[in-house]
Amino acid sequence: MRGTLLKFSLVFLMVVAGCGKARDTYLESQKPKKNVSFPHTENWSAKTEHGLTSIDLGKESCASSSCHGEDLSGGYSQISCDMCHTTYPHENGWITQGTHWQQALAVGTAKCAECHGKDFKGGDTGVSCFNCHTLYPHQEGWTLNHNLYLKQGNYNTSGCATSCHGTDFKGGNSGIACFSCHTSFPHPPGWVNWDSTGHGLYLKTYAWDTGRCIDCHGQDLTGGSAGISCYSCHSTYPHPAENLWLTRSETQFHGNVVNAQGSPSICAQCHGTDYLGKNTGISCYSCHSLYPHDNDWASYTHGDYVNSNGDSSCISCHEDLRAGFSLNPVLYPNCQYCH
């Protein structure tokens, strides 16, 4: 009886051992091919555990039907990766097909920062967003400081004119047009020779509204954040307020400016050498019909004019035609200066 019992015990142990070995073999075959600790550690949900492991071994280490599924949507565990992080694991073509920018816009770059670091320079992944696009994600306070960045780069906007804001700066993939904040910058590419004539033609289109320039060039147009003063090219434009520029009793009266310059030629830059308007469309003669005088005025024309029309129209500049004068004697002499 004892012998029979002993034999049965040995057979039982062999069977149990065989079943245990078979179970271990089965479980081993169902484990991911790479070495992921299972059961998972107590702190497995922390990104320093499963996150760094998946980075180290690859997301395929999680992708099996017995664990999280071939597509990582849950598998046998019914725990989908998307339950915690909606944009990772990244789908095929994440970079090459441009999918990641759509996700970044949809969920916000804060989701990217969880893996790529608060400064987006790599974080746990070691993959910096700036490896591919040097300016995005924009740094904190970008909307207030991007003008300084552009200034440092001599206002080279090529970094903005990409798929992000579009080659026309009207929004591109971001849907954010540069012109939604500053209406004339980046300066319109359609206006050729912006520095020489383009900006003048642009202002003419908007009835010379220099208010469009003040955000960058300053309230007084002497440079502002751009550091480029309008007066560095044309010393008398933009003109002072109309009530100062056109009122003779004011020190900023345009006649005083011409008098100080010693010649009305300073006006010719904008109003044309014939003073008929040029780019401005404003002729000097629309206010004073005789001035600026033509080239033959002093020698011949003024005599004929006075003989025909009298000297009343001359008095506005030559206030005292006989006894003296109030303006520059070279520009505005009295009659006795010559005869």
Image (spheres, helix red, strand yellow):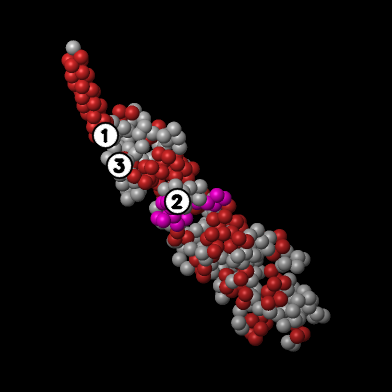
The image quadrant that residue 35 belongs to is: top left
Along the viewing direction, whichever of 292 and 308 lies nearer the viewer: 292
Q: Can the viewer see residue 102? A: no
- Mark 1 lies on residue: 28
Range shown magenta: 126-143
Q: CA distance from mark 1 to mark 2?
A: 35 Å
Residue 267 location, x and y as percent?
A: 61, 72
Q: Is disc 2 surrounded by few (<14), some (14 to 19) or many (20+) residues within 10 Å? A: some
- Does the residue at mark 3 contact the one at mark 2 (Cβ under 8 Å)? no
The image quadrant that residue 276 belongs to is: bottom right
Along the viewing direction, whichever of 287 and 73 lies nearer the viewer: 73
Q: What secondary structure is marked by label 2? A: loop
Along the viewing direction, whichever of 282 and 161 lies nearer the viewer: 161
155 left or right, relative to 334:
left
Q: What secondary structure is marked by label 1? A: helix
Q: Nearer the viewer, mark 1 or mark 2?
A: 1
- Mark 3 lies on residue: 34
Q: Can the viewer see residue 227? A: yes
- Mark 2 lies on residue: 122
Q: Residue at x 32, y 37 (%)?
A: 62
Given the image, on which type of amino acid does mark 3 rest? Lys
Q: Residue at x 72, y 67 (%)?
A: 252
Question: Is the N terminus in the top left, top right, bottom left or bottom right quadrant?
Answer: top left
